[in-house]
Amino acid sequence: MDKIRLIDTHAHLDFEDLSKNLDEIIKNCEINGIERVIIPGVTIKDTYKIIELIDKYDFLYGAVGLHPSDAKDWDDNSYETLKEYAKHDKVIAIGETGLDYYWDKTFNEQQQFVFKEHIRLSKELKLPLIVHDREAHGDVLKIIKETNAKEIGGVMHCFSGSAEFALECIKENFYIALGGPVTFKNAKQPKEVAKIIPIDKLVLETDSPFLAPQPFRGKTNDPSKVRLVAEEIADLRGITLKELSESTFNNSIKLFFSN
């Protein structure tokens, strides 16, 4: 097995179905060359779990934010609460934040407001954004441009748009994160994105415990499986796994760990 270095830029290790098996997950990460894992925030009330994990394990880092599906939970104290959590020296991003119009379109305006507040916080603290975008490409890009989020940049998490949209996001100073779906047999669009985007704008993720890559599709995902994502993208681009892993590792360092 080649000696490679990988970073999983998005894994929910604070979720119970992963946190209860952390010792095994950590062992598998070591075997597969995963040197760092970023745990994104989903709810404000559970952020303490992320802080506990990043305090306990050297290779774990955190982000703080409120997932767009939970935007109704935003209140007058949320901004300052997240700001306090973000002062931790191992909190390296703001998010995940963004827009999700897939499940419920009844509070789109609230989602947009909360997204803008996260962008304001990222600028204040000079921390990159982790952006969630599901069925909301147009509004996400519009808000990024209106707020000049380019000033701080970040990553488009679990990218689900077209190659053309990916290039638009890159113009706005955002990296593209690809995960398990790029390995799915009929995933034409993610495979096209993987082949077309500049390699210096690509990072890897699992979105564990969701979206496990082939041949584990439908099962619980974990950060060790980011290697399968890397292998697939390397094949699609016609380069070695070593080349792909070095590029994405360095991209992740530049994006999240160079401030």
Image (cartoon, helix red, strand yellow):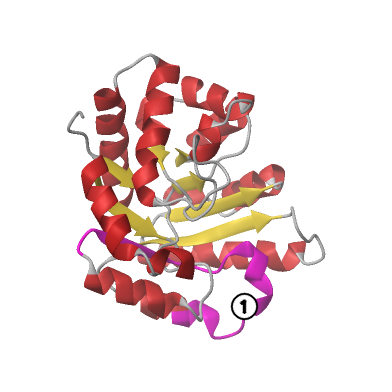
Residue 105 versus residue 175 in the image, above or below: below
User: What's the residue at 38%, 41% (across, down)?
Assistant: 226
Q: Position of residue 222 (x, y in %)?
A: 41, 52
Magenta span covers which residues?
A: 58-81
Q: Is residue 87 left or right of residue 131?
A: left
Camera-side residue of 72 and 240: 240
* SS at mark 1 in the image: loop
Figure quadrant of the N terminus: top left
Q: Pointer 1: residues within 10 angstroms few (<14), some, or many (20+)?
A: some
Which residue shows up at 54% across the image and 46% down it?
211
Badge 1 is on which residue?
74
Asked whether residue 29 is in view, the answer is yes
Q: Nearer the viewer, residue 17 or 240?
A: 17
Is residue 84 rendered to the left or right of residue 139?
left
Residue 14 falls in image quadrant: bottom left
**Residue furthest toward the bottom?**
77
Q: Nearer the viewer, residue 121 or 48?
A: 48
Q: Nearer the viewer, residue 187 or 17?
A: 17
Q: Position of residue 62 (x, y in %)?
A: 35, 64
| Kind of residue sitting beneath label 1 | Trp
Q: Is residue 218 left or right of residue 236?
A: right
Q: Quadrant of the C terminus?
A: bottom left
